[in-house]
Amino acid sequence: MADFRTCPACGTRNKLKWEFCVKCGESLQEVAAGASQAPAASGAVDAEGPGFDWGSGLLTVLALGTAVFVALKFRPQPTTVDPAIFAFPAQALASPPPPTGDLGSEGRTAQGLRVLYSGDTAGALEALAQAAAENPDDPNARQAYGRALWQAGQRQAAIQEMLAATRIAPGDARLQADTARMLVSVGRAADAIPLFEAALRLEPLSPGWLGQLAQVYMDQGNAARAAELLQRAAAASGGNAAFLQDLGFALQKAGNADAAADAYRQALKSDPRSDTTRALLAEQLLTAGKGDEAVSLVRDGLGQGGPALYRVLGSLLERNGRPQEAAEAYREYAKRSPQAADARSLEERAQTLENPTAS
């Protein structure tokens, strides 16, 4: 099995444990190991943008209970960051030579980073701690020490060093964003907002940073601000389907149903094979009283995606007053997904719809 995943947007190889592309921020959560996929039809995220960007994640559509409805969730998990994403990639280097003479703060920082790059975190800490102590006003020394502390698992101490570096070097956009993600990963999302905002003032066209900050705002209930950021992320990425889909959900939460439907349509045009986007748009149409249009939309996607669309179709048909057709859709879903946790319950629901007097 390959020990990497290839970004579908920019072609960069990423470690298996990374959930987002290290170069462009594209989601890797559904990319198979070793996969080499063509760039997304919506256009690749700007490969010249800042590194370690975060792209956006996927919404989830589930049918639950006997009523069978589509439940929406903005992200597959809360705003968190894999701590390992900040680790320096180990390089195939021999053990660095020991320092000779008095290197000074700058030389000690470089030496410590060489040791850190080689994979010897413990060995790097002493040199980097000394470099930071010798020159506390050197942002490079402070953030290098912070990264070493982070890799050593000393999260709070690492954040203190990184915050110190951001105050010394407020014009370093990547430093601001990296520190923001560290704060998010330890549950301090509110403290991360000013740093993300600062990074975006310096690099306003970073789709990944826009998407990550939008997620923080969504988690805090500020859907309107999230929608603004996602609109910018979608534009900066050339119409990336994932950003458009998240934009639709943010607009929906902000109470702008028409704009949400438009965003979902754009996302579906960009990625017609997305079952999730199709289901979300169908829900919007059904809510707007356009049940027949919603059903047609989902039928058009059958065969392009996975069997989950049959479950969505059944739910739409049932709520649109077409029980017999709904039963057929539920049975088709159970047939195509016999091992699914809800396969049996939907078989039973189909029987109830076909024989309502027997229940």
Image (spheres, rainbow, N blue to C red):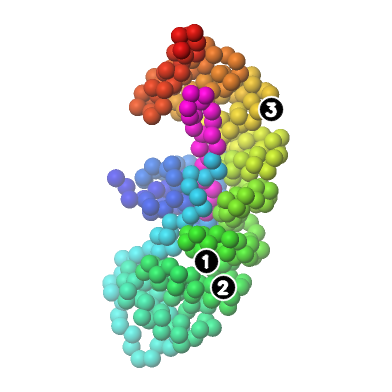
Left or right of 311 on screen, residue 3:
left
Element type at marker 3?
Answer: loop
Magenta stretch in the rendered image? 54-72
Label 2 to label 3: alpha-carbon separation:
47 Å
Q: Is residue 217 above or below residue 69?
A: below
Quadrant of the frame with the N terminus:
top left
Q: Where does residue 136 sit, x and y in percent of width and height? A: 51, 84
Q: Is residue 142 above or below residue 194?
A: below
In the image, what residue occupies the spot 37% across and 77% down?
A: 125
Among all residues in the image, which is located at the extreme bottom?
101
Name the kind of residue labelled 2 in the image: Thr
Callouts 1 and 2 close, C-beta under 8 Å: yes
Mark 3 or mark 1, which is nearer the start of the sequence? 1
Q: Quadrant of residue 30?
A: top left
Residue on which the image places disc 3:
288
Left or right of 311 on screen, residue 87:
left
Name the kind of residue labelled 1 in the image: Thr
Label 1 to label 3: alpha-carbon separation:
42 Å
Name the kind of residue labelled 3 in the image: Ala
Residue on which the image places disc 1:
179
In the image, what residue occupies the spot 47% across and 27% down?
A: 65
Label 1 to label 2: alpha-carbon separation:
8 Å
